[in-house]
Image (cartoon, rainbow, N blue to C red):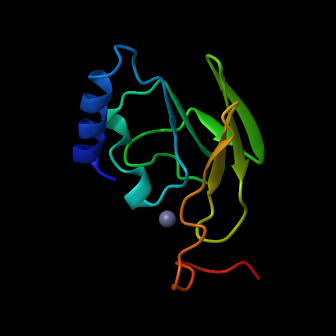
Amino acid sequence: MNAEAAGWLKDNLSQITDKPITHLIYSHSHGDHASGGSVLGAETVAAQQNAPATIDGVAPTLRVVDTHELIVGSKTFELTYLGEGHGEDMLAVIVRPENVDFITDVAAPKRLPFRTLPS
Ligand SMILES: [Zn+2]
């Protein structure tokens, strides 16, 4: 969201764990989802191949073309490029083994799509 919100998140995470934030996955590069990432200090920063060279000053270290499995401890993060639509660099994330899916800005009830539609 922004540096202040990222700082709040980092502070609250530090109250429940002493482990560092090691990975940051950008769902896409729009400012309302991708600002403040530098505050988190993650070593691995994942974004889709079409994302800008830097996102709010953070350079992705992992660029996903179509799909990528990111294994962190006992978790697997399945990153999948969603194609053109709301943005040019949309990633969906499925966390295994919980089978929890994170998809942002793909559907907006009672609204037209935010940006261009693929032809
Ligand atoms: Zn967006």
As rendered, which of 16 and 59 lies closer to the eye? 16
The extreme front residue here reads 98
Left or right: where 44 falls relative to 18: right
Residue 73 location (% of width, % of height): 61, 16
Task: Judge left or right: residue 4 versus residue 73.
Answer: left
Residue sitting at 77 percent across and 43 percent down?
Answer: 67
Q: Nearer the viewer, residue 80 or 107?
A: 107
Specify the quadrant of the image occupied by residue 70.
Answer: top right
Residue at image x 38%, y 60%?
A: 32
Give residue 54's position: percent from left, percent from top: 46, 46
For the point 38% across and 48% down, which residue is it? Answer: 56
Which of the image's four quarters has the C terminus? bottom right
Q: Residue 10: horizontal and vertical position, in percent?
A: 30, 31
Image vertical order of residue 31 relative to residue 116, above or below: above
Foreground: 84 or 52? 84
Is 40 positioned to the left or the right of 98 in the image? left
Picture coordinates of residue 97, whole percent (x, y): 70, 30
| Viewer-nearest residue: 60 or 100 | 100
